[in-house]
Image: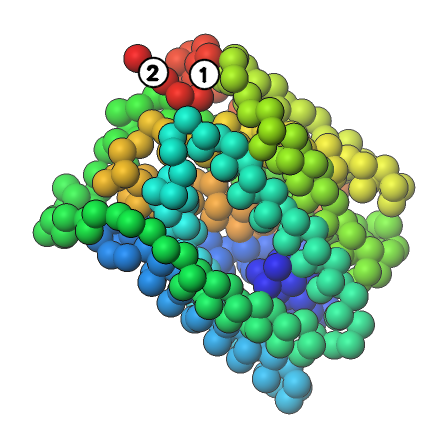
Amino acid sequence: MGFQMLSVAVGWQVYALTNSALDLGLVGLAQFLPALCLVLVSGHVADRYDRRIIVRVCQSLEALAVAALAVASARGLVTERMIFAFVALVGAARAFEAPTLQALLPGLIPAPVLPRAVAASASANQTAVIVGPAAGGLLYALGPTVVYATSALLFLLASLLIWRIRIERVAPKREPATLKSIFAGIAFIRSKPVVLGAISLDLFAVLLGGATALLPIYARDILAIGPWGLGLLRSAPAVGALSMALFLARHPPKHRVGRTMFAAVVAFGFATMLFAVSTSFFLSLATLIVLGASDMISVVIRSSLVQLDTPDAMRGRVSAVNSVFIGTSNQLGEFESGVTAAWLGTVPAVLLGGVGTVVVVLLWMRLFPALLHRDRLLDER
């Protein structure tokens, strides 16, 4: 919730300060670059140290960064460069937090029920994604300081709750930090066509379909609905994702998971195209709900495949690469959307991204036949 509220406040404040689509894209780039630079280090750390402590420290740093934005906004000192700097700090902390959280979950859950656990975890996350942007949009009426302060408190609360996790886990063997061990995650992914195909498919889908960065423009200039409408637009994909996650938690995909994943990404691409040309607020909400639901199908299948096909000793490093490919590609996708919107205009940029997503699916079906024909999530061979 804290991160989603932060995203709403940052997006609206940056656009209010600059009126620039490119600067909205730069917000995403400021989060992506630290994660890209730290990907190898963060994965190695997650496999060597207590994952609970890593997450707690990261969330505490995020709380401090957001609190600093609250203070700067309250004093009228905030600038777009200051926002970029603190967003980059949050991005650096999340570079360690995201893969560590991904690697932590399988150690708590037996493998046969991991897909249901992934869906349940996604349900909790999507609930926050729904509530966070809507609350952020409403609180922004009281000023960005209120949103940032609330977000900082939520980050701090999250760090305290992580400390309550109890887990019995054999202490990881702390092998020397060699180039081979650091790059082991990349080598493992390259050796597994199913894992490589699943991760890279979502990478390009999110990269090309990063329309959320341009939602402030749709809210103010195209749909004319203001900050509260922006919060609803940002929440809409999460409504679809949460509904689908709750369904998948009870009915996880059991057969033809590869074809199901490809079909979901195609639906994601068509939903993006329809949203691009919509001038109706309610139609835009509907397309974003479909977009979120189709994306959740892909997320659950990809996450389950990656975790089930990866041994625990490698999960930190593989999850770090996965986080850059998927998690931070959201931010890189926002940058790409901002740049193409500055060049081509907002609507053509989003429309082009949806078309590109469908093209990538067709290409990946030929490049990764093992993923296309994967039947079950848990490969028992």
Q: Please give left or right for residue 192 compared with residue 146 in the image.
A: left
Judged from the image, the secondary structure of the residue bearing numbered disc 2 is: loop
Q: Nearer the viewer, residue 353 or 98?
A: 98
Visible residue check, residue 16: yes
Give the labeled residue for mark 1.
376
Confirm or deny contact between disc 2 and disc 1 (CB under 8 A).
Answer: yes
Q: Residue at x 48, y 76 (%)?
A: 64
Q: Residue at x 48, y 63 (%)?
A: 161
* Residue 344 % position (x, y): 69, 43
Give the labeled residue for mark 2.
380
Q: Quadrant of the C terminus?
A: top left
Between the residue at mark 2 and the residue at mark 1, the CA separation in whole angstroms equals 9 Å
Q: Please give left or right for residue 136 compared with residue 379 in the image.
A: right
Visible residue check, residue 208: no
Q: Residues within 10 Å of mark 1 (few under 14, many from 20)?
A: some
Q: Tell me how the rendering is colored.
A: rainbow
Q: Residues within 10 Å of mark 2 (few under 14, many from 20)?
A: few
Labels in figure, total: 2
- The quarter holding residue 28 reads bottom right
Disc 2 residue type? Glu
Disc 1 residue type? Arg
* Residue 272 % position (x, y): 70, 34
- The quarter holding residue 49 reads bottom left
Q: Nearer the viewer, residue 65 or 209?
A: 65
Q: Residue at x 62, y 76 (%)?
A: 149
